[in-house]
Amino acid sequence: MSAASASASAADQADAAQPSTRSLRGLDGINLLMADVRDGVGPYLSVFLKGAEHWDAGAIGIAMAASSIAAAVCQIPAGLLVDGTRAKRLLIAVSGLMVGAGCLLIVVFPHFATVVAAQALLGAASAIIPPAIAALSLGLVGRRLFDGRISRNESFNHGGNFLAAGLAGVLGQYVGYHWIFYLVCGFAVASALVVTLINPAEIDHDRARGGEEAAENGQPIAFHDLLKRRDLLVFLASVVLFHFGNAAMLPMAGQVLAVAHPGSDTIALSACIIAAQLVMVGVAWAVGRASGRGIGRKPIFLLALAVLPVRGVLFSFTSSPYAVVAIQLLDGVAAGIFGVISVLIASDLMRGTGRFNLAQGLTALSVGIGAALSNAAAGYVVQWFGYATGFLYLAGIAGVALVFFAVLMPETKSAEAA
């Protein structure tokens, strides 16, 4: 038997190994509980700072951007760390607890310097969570079952967001904004406990970094060689543009509600998140089914990109809580697709390189750059020209993203897989 055949045979045998039900349930639990932890308090921070602390839109934009900038700086080190370590479970637990600590800082000391510093801590901690979860998934189930596993991960993730948004809406409306932050802390502690359900002996760490078919004696390719891959660079630029056009829309909608409907802004924002998360659960499942039936990555991602300009234009015309909730359903389509398809595209591009988790870090870096640009720029556009112009500005960026990806990005799904 040739060396290549032996390597392929070994990879097939590894893929055939089935993890225990306990480990898979632990992975389900992590995705459910980490849904609210890995992004901190998300758009609720915008409502808290506007409604309770009376910050202006520019300062809120800087605070929101601080987390994204910190996450962006930490993404490449986080990807390299996840690729190189066997303590992936510990990384997830510690990162979650750091997010909980940052949320406590914000609610106890809601001053500009403290909030920005805490947001930076949240961003740095949350940089590790997505690639670590993706690595655990690939290491446990193998590439053959990876599409279905990522789809399941995202379904549980959106289910967790649904649960957290419902609880946050009730707590924010009837108890106070502060309890939303305490809720995240509770999820962080629970996630640190659930991660212990995964059996570390069942994790194939070579497979978890996409190195099961790596050339060059099984060693990962050099970082500088990775950055020479045109298809990877086009994909990362598309991710930046996607989040540039998307990230600030929901926080801005929350600010509109806080101004137009004071007192009901938290429950309305929770309704937005709940509605979107319900859609995301179904969309994540549908993406997994579509991928399993041979549909390529590119047309699925193009659908996500196409709904963003429509959402931005619609937001510019209304401040009605009911209309905002209805429009937010489109975010369920876009974000539900992105959560699954971005991991699958990164997996396609990194097959045999041993750099899957680094690619996850680069993807998250691109998300952070796009989100930081979106929140910072849109905050000042709103401050100078108003909310309607801010939404139209983001819709224009989203339109550029659609054209860019459609023209320059190739299909990544292999003919054999299709």
Image (cartoon, rainbow, N blue to C red):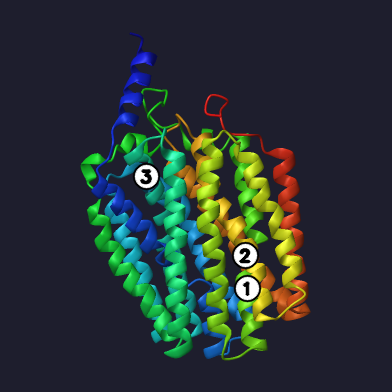
Query: Image check: 136 left or right of 51?
Result: left
Label 1: state its secondary structure: helix
- What is the quadrant of the N terminus in the image? top left
Residue 355 visible, this angle: yes
Q: What's under tag 2, amino acid-wise? A: Leu
Residue 137 is marked as: 3
Mark 3 or mark 1: whose residue is earlier in sequence: 3
> Is 17 rendered above or below residue 188?
above
Q: Residue at x 64, y 55 (%)?
A: 242
Q: Residue at x 76, y 79 (%)?
A: 386
Q: What's under tag 1, amino acid-wise? A: Val
CB contact under 8 Å: marks 1 and 2: yes
Query: Image check: 10 left or right of 282?
Result: left
Residue under label 2: 329
**In the image shown, does 162 or 125 lie closer to the viewer?**
162
Q: Position of residue 344 (x, y in %)?
A: 51, 41
Q: Position of residue 304 (x, y in %)?
A: 64, 52
Query: Image check: 203 left or right of 270?
Result: left
Residue under label 1: 325
CB contact under 8 Å: marks 3 and 2: no
Q: Position of residue 265 (x, y in %)?
A: 58, 84
Label 2: state its secondary structure: helix
- What is the quadrant of the C terminus in the image? top right
Residue 270 is marked as: none
